[in-house]
């Protein structure tokens, strides 16, 4: 049975046929979402799930003469934008603006009683590692986490592309994490 047949079955009222659509398109959609989300690819499954829910709810709007995969990827694209916007709003509520550190600390929070390091050790390591960063990297982190600028705002201010800004911030965060783990080796094995 083709994808078009499965779509027509769902539109005819056979809700159980929707699983055939998901089975047929899931790998493609997950790959697409992972690619579009870049450093946030670990959250792609959530976005894909939301895309399938949205697609099911508005399937009657799909023009059967069009390419369903293109339509589904378009829905996914808008789900990614929505997810990022929600995430950005949540991040802007953080008082400290240092989400990179908070995420790192949360990753290790479960095991903190088993280790000799404390949150103050992590903050101390963070300050040390940030002090060793090039000035440009420090500026990026300040703009992103202290001034809560969007990736687009940062890119525009520095005459760079959004892709460059996002990738560079991701790499700087990874560099800081590596530096902190180097200063506290027991963190690496538990993160």
Image (spheres, rainbow, N blue to C red):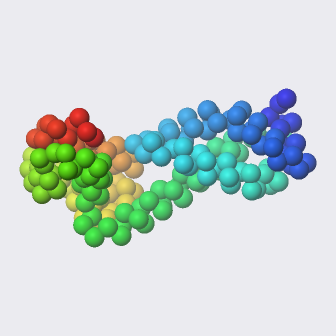
Q: Is residue 70 above or below residue 152?
A: above
Q: Is residue 62 left or right of residue 123?
A: right
x then y, percent, for residue 137: 20, 49
Q: Quadrant of residue 91?
A: bottom left
Residue sticking out furthest to the right: 12
Q: Is residue 1 above or below residue 118?
A: above
x then y, percent, for residue 6: 83, 38
Residue sticking out furthest to the front: 114
Q: Quadrant of residue 3?
A: top right
* Residue at figure coordinates x 68%, y 54% from the top left: 54
Q: Is residue 157 above or below residue 168?
A: below
In this figure, what is the number of numbered marks? 0
* Residue at figure coordinates x 39%, y 50% from the top left: 162
Nearest to the observer: residue 59 or residue 70: 59
* Residue at figure coordinates x 11%, y 52% from the top left: 121
Nearest to the observer: residue 20 or residue 144: 20
Q: Quadrant of residue 183?
A: top left
Nearest to the observer: residue 156 or residue 132: 132
On the rendered image, what quadrant is the C terminus found in?
A: top left
x then y, percent, for residue 75: 65, 50
Q: Is residue 185 left or right of residue 62?
A: left
On the rendered image, what quadrant is the N terminus found in?
A: top right
């Amino acid at each position: 049975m083709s994808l078009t047949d499965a779509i027509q079955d769902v539109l005819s009222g056979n809700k159980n046929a929707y699983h055939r659509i998901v089975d047929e398109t899931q790998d493609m959609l997950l790959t697409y979402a992972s690619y579009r989300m870049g450093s946030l690819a670990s959250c792609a499954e959530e976005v894909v799930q939301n895309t399938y829910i949205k697609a099911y709810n508005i399937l009657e709007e799909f023009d059967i003469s069009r390419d369903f995969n293109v339509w589904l990827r378009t829905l996914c694209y808008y789900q990614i934008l929505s997810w990022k916007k929600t995430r950005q709003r949540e991040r802007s509520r953080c008082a400290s603006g240092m989400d990179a550190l908070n995420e790192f600390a949360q990753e290790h929070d479960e095991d903190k009683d088993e280790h000799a390091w404390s949150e103050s050790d992590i903050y101390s390591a963070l300050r040390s590692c940030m002090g060793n960063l090039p000035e440009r990297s420090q500026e990026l982190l300040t703009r992103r986490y202290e001034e809560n600028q969007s990736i687009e705002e940062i890119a525009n201010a520095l005459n760079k592309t959004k892709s460059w800004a996002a990738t560079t911030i991701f790499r700087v965060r990874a560099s800081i994490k590596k530096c902190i783990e180097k200063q506290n080796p027991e963190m690496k094995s538990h993160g």
